[in-house]
Image (cartoon, grey):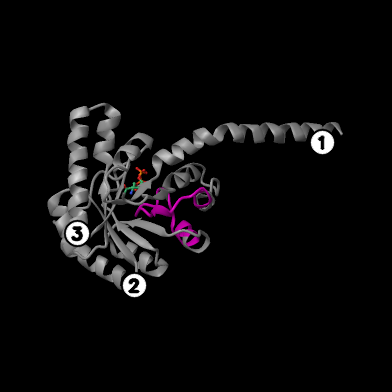
Amino acid sequence: MAGLIRLGVNIDHVATVRNARGGAHPDPVRFAKLAAEAGADGITAHLREDRRHIRDADIDRLRAEVDRPLNLEMAATPEMLAIALRVKPHAACLVPEKREERTTEGGLDVVGQKAAIAPVVKELAAEGVRVSLFVEADEAALEQSALLGAAVVELHTGTWCEALVAGAHGEAAREFARLAAGARLAARLGLEVHAGHGLDYASARTLAALPEIAEFNIGHFLIGEAIAVGLPETIRLMKAAMAEGREARAA
Ligand SMILES: CC(=O)[C@@H](O)[C@H](O)COP(=O)(O)O
Ligand SMILES: NCC(=O)COP(=O)(O)O
């Protein structure tokens, strides 16, 4: 039987909530520590070029304060490369980025952009950073990823997850078959196989059956669920604080 799949917890959207008010609360580093205590195998954070959620200082603190491997998601740009070489995360996952997108919309064009990606992979690897390429589960992308010298590919699961949520059964079945074939090919090419984007309990359960997959990176769903699951206790603590204030006044 294949070993257990590692879980990388993406804390981007703690920072999204923090930034909505421009203050320091909630703190993504606190959530990363809680995730680590709860069994997360790694922490993932995407430092977008527009800094819409995670910021440079978050990355520095995640590296310094959290006792789990940090997977830094980044565009393959000179600015991000300089940051990664300074921070030296455990891993760097190169992802495509568009300013106007709400979230990552697909895999990296490793074939069309190989000239730009190759030196980034090389420099990171030379500094001991494990390089992962976030790609579609397609033959050309996987073969090119191996040629580029990446240690890992993270298969983009977003299209499959969207089809599942929409109840588009035919498309979901085709996408799952593509992911399964991609995972097999990537493993044959000597790449470690990760998967992520849009995963929830149901899709993670289904995808975990693929024996080649070593790691999932999951964020948006986990943070959304954490708000729901954590709300009752938070309300209890707030009511207790309010009652204590009243009692103190009466005393
Ligand atoms: C690369 C990927 O699929 C995501 O982890 C990415 O970080 C999504 O970006 P947002 O967190 O900004 O939605
Ligand atoms: N690389 C995928 C990731 O880190 C989390 O993606 P999502 O669960 O926030 O969609």
Amino acid identity at mark 3: Ser
Residue ID for mark 3: 145
From the viewer's perspective, tell me whether residue 86 is left or right of residue 109.
Answer: right
Judged from the image, the secondary structure of the residue bearing numbered disc 3 is helix
**Mark 1 vs mark 2: in front:** 2
Image side of residue 64 versus residue 172, left or right: right
Q: Secondary structure at mark 1?
A: helix
Q: Nearer the viewer, mark 1 or mark 3?
A: 3
Residue 74, how many percent across, how many down?
Answer: 33, 57
Give the number of the disc on residue 248.
1
Labels 1 and 3: the sequence-earlier one: 3
Q: For mark 3, does the 10 Å Cα neighbourhood hold few (<14), some (14 to 19), or many (20 or more) residues?
A: many
Looking at this view, name the residue that lies furthest to the front. 1
Report the residue marked by disc 2: 127
Is disc 2 placed on a helix, strand or loop? Answer: loop
Amino acid tagged 2: Glu
Q: Is residue 37 magenta?
A: yes
Q: Is residue 106 above or below residue 132?
A: above
Mark 1 and ligand 2: say if the CB distance to the nearest ligand atom is below 8 Å.
Answer: no
State the image coordinates of residue 218 (x, y, percent, origin top left): 38, 45
Task: Give the mark nearer the N terminus: 1 vs 2.
Answer: 2
Seen as rendered, the residue at the extreme top is: 167
Q: CA distance from mark 1 to mark 2?
A: 58 Å
Q: Looking at the figure, which quarter contains the C terminus?
A: top right
Q: Can see residue 113?
A: no
Across and down, in percent, residue 158 comes to: 27, 40
Magenta segment: 35-62
Task: Say how many tags the image has.
Answer: 3
Label 2 and label 3: CA atoms lie apart by 19 Å
Q: CA distance from mark 1 to mark 3?
A: 64 Å
Residue nearer the viewer, 245 or 210: 210
What residue appears at the point 35 percent right and 48 percent down from the top-left corner? 216
